[in-house]
Image (spheres, rainbow, N blue to C red):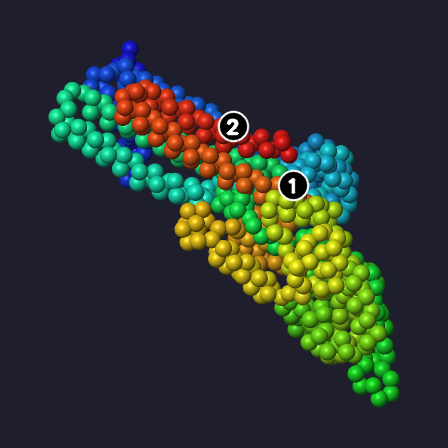
Amino acid sequence: VALASVAVGIPEIALKAFGSLRNGIVDINTLMGIAIVGACALQDFGEAAAVVALFALSEWLEARAMAKTSRAIGAVLALRPETARRRGDTALVAVEEVKVREVVLVKPGEKVPLDGEIVAGASAIDESALTGESMPVPKRVGDVVYGGTLNQGGILEIRVSCVAADSAVSRLVRLIEEAQASRSSSELAIERFARVYTPVVIIAAALVMIVQYSSGVKGNEPAYLACVLLVIACPCALVLSTPVVAVSALTVCAQRGVLVKGSAHLERLGRIERVFMDKTGTLTRGSFTLTAVRLVRPARNGDENQRPALGVGALLRWLCALESRSSHPLAHAVLRGAGAAVRVASEQCVVEDFETIDGQGAKAIVDGRRVEVGNGELALENAWDANDVELTNMANTWESEGGTVVWVGVDGRLAGIIRCDDVVRPTAAKAVDDLRKIGAEVEMITGDNPGSAEYLRARVGVNPTHVRASLKPQDKLRIIGEAIEALENKSSKIALKLFGRGTVAMVGDGINDAPALTAADVGVAMGVAGTAAAMETADVALMTNDLSLLVDTIVLGRECVRKIRQNVIFSVTTKLVVLVLSILGYTGLWQAIAVDVGTALLVIFNGMSILRERNNR
């Protein structure tokens, strides 16, 4: 019976071992194969059969346990719709056949096939699969919907805005697949260790046997001990200690509407010590509203510094013509607030030489006049703040009230100022407080004026010494670089090698803050469900604008680091204990393989416990 068991089980182990050896890798199957052959050579067929049976059982149990994780991530990958129904056609077609600007029909209970804009109908859309938001979102004509979300209400007609490969859900699935393929520093280190460790173990076991026989030991004991050492040294649990944790955590993040591009970024999140946040679009909604316009006072006799009087309509018309070329949130506020008539009139303006002024604003030639628009830095550089004291005082008042002031100049002279107001995110204050509670230092860095920054600081609870305003993109890069350098200097060289340093995160809108996101250890982009550039740029992408997800993800990252350490320590400690017991003669082959199986399963179950985080939230 024992020989029959060995005959049935050994071929699969031998084939796997041979395949690894052909690639120059000595793996776990090689160790087990040598131990089984050794036991048979010693005519200890019962021990050989026990090794075969227990190793096969361990492989089966590991496959079953990992399958649960695979099913969880598979549910996320299954979001991508496969068919669509064109308006006026009852037949279903593959989503790849639908072109941009075609109109598709979505019935109640069906998935939205592609990203687009509703042109007819109204409904409630379940976006939980894409963004993690549990409550259905009301949608009507003009609203944007995303592929993979579920229509829970009425019939919708949707004009497609992108092809299937570029939809939000397709990008999400593609990036999740890439994240699964990536490896963290812990995984790579363990893989490199196992690659060297396994052949060393074979040599060490052979040397133990040779030394014992050379010292005069008779019988089968030295050979048997060498076989036991091969089984004990099997690094199965150690190799599994990191991947199972990483896959489980990435799955939980995807289910919450957080895209983490690989376990390396998750580990870095777990070591976050400083979090830098942009103001506009991060701590605030980034949906500005144009609330006031003030023109420069007319010139008086002998007053060369003042602009001739301009009508509000003319100023807004030129401003809209310029801002229509910009992607900044303030530009959209100006275009919306100016009114339809002014927007239509601005389309007749001739705009030439449009140029973004880095960290200050923009300028262009509009109808032959040089129009400049920007922040207080631009006004200071052009000495506009000295042109009209009354207007400057008004700007200071607006800023102290939390408004954002936009200065407008024509032909190098001040023409007027406009005020735009933003809304603080409902979750911002709690997120800042929660980050502080878990030991992360929150700092606000913004290109907005000091008055607006101070107003928001008081609303969300950021430390007064941790606010820096009127920054250019290069200033943000410098600040993040200094923070990283400070954390490196905080630890000794030995501690850096063994444990790494604390990390720095930058949270922004994913487009205007792209350089800062890239410079930080972890770049986090907000609300990027439909923003391709942000999804591609950031290390971590929040599909919604809920800042509490950032706190949850950092906590999850710390839990990952903790569980990886638990798994590694448990795996190594167990092996050492069994090794000592084997040398003392208390354990044999079947006990060694049983411990190896049990250790591997406990490591897997400990890593998979992260999947419960979804329900705990």
Disc 2 secondary structure class: helix
Quadrant containing the C terminus in the rendered view: top right
Q: Distance between the residues labelled 2 and 1?
A: 22 Å
Instruction: Identify residue type, mark 2.
Output: Lys
- Specify whether residue 245 is in view: no
> To which quarter of the image does residue 293 belong?
bottom right
Q: Mark 2 or mark 1, which has the lower sequence index?
A: 2
Residue 283: x %, y % from top left: 69, 52
Which mark is drawn over residue 68? 2
For label 1, the residue is: 131
Q: Give 511 or 110, whichever is nearer the viewer.
A: 511
Disc 1 secondary structure class: helix
Q: Which residue is drawn at 35% across and 41% down?
A: 193
> To which quarter of the image does residue 17 belong?
top left
Locate residue 15 relative to residue 165 in the image: left or right: left
> To which quarter of the image does residue 184 belong?
top left
Locate residue 174 relative to residue 15 in the image: left or right: right
- Specify whether residue 551 is in view: yes
Locate residue 81 relative to residue 583 in the image: left or right: right
State whether residue 9 is above or below residue 88.
above
